[in-house]
Amino acid sequence: MASSPYQVLCVCLGNICRSPTAEIILKHYVKLAGLPVEIDSAGTSNYHPNKAPDPRTQKFARARGYDLSHLRARQICREDYDQFDLILAMDETNLSDLQWQINNLVQQGELHASVMDRLALMSEHDPKFSRQAIPDPYFGQASDFERVIVQCESAAQAWVEYWQANLDILRRQS
Ligand code: 4NP
């Protein structure tokens, strides 16, 4: 069997602010490190189907050198739980929404309960914002959008360091 890249899904509520930012920043650090990891993002809601990231998110990301303009929002779906090895929630509400959806799918016989083990917080290994939420900036101001980038950069670097120290985690069979 051929090996295929480890698959990571970043998840927030709307998939137009935090998770697309996390996706692009994680891709940046994974590429720098040369790790075999593929990254996508999705929302727990279907509030903004096929929309580009929020203009404020794009503006503050662009100022830090990240281009989010090609991304389009989508809602997480059942097939994502088959595809992704790791699902990163931006905050505790995203995490509990994912747990609720997985529980329902397990009860319907659609998923194995072990999928629950693939959930983690984006900030899981972050030494600066350890297991802290990446706060929803949608109804906030400029500093809230800047904070998302700062936290995503810190959290993403921590995941990359974790994978570099535990390369066996990235080995998967297709
Ligand atoms: P996100 O932010 O979850 O970081 O994408 C939000 C985007 C949209 C809404 C809420 C949060 N909304 O209510 O439409």
Image: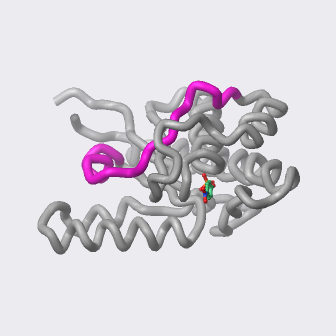
Q: Position of residue 130 (x, y in %)?
A: 68, 67
Q: Position of residue 165 (x, y in %)?
A: 54, 47
Q: Residue at x 54, y 42 (%)?
A: 164
Q: Position of residue 5 (x, y in %)?
A: 37, 32
Q: Is residue 28 left or right of residue 49?
A: right
The reply to whether the magenta stretch includes residue 70 is: yes
48 relative to 5, above or below: below
Given residues 19 and 150, the one toward you in this image is 19
The quadrant of the picture occupied by the N terminus is: top left
Q: Residue at x 39, y 48 (%)?
A: 169
Q: Residue at x 67, y 68 (%)?
A: 132
The image quadrant of residue 137 is bottom right
Which segment did they paint magenta? 67-84
133 relative to 59, above or below: below
The image quadrant of residue 21 is top right
Magenta residues, dominant SS class: loop
Q: How is the image coloured?
A: one colour
Which image quadrant shows ligand 1? bottom right
Q: Residue at x 78, y 28 (%)?
A: 65
The quadrant of the picture occupied by the C terminus is: top left
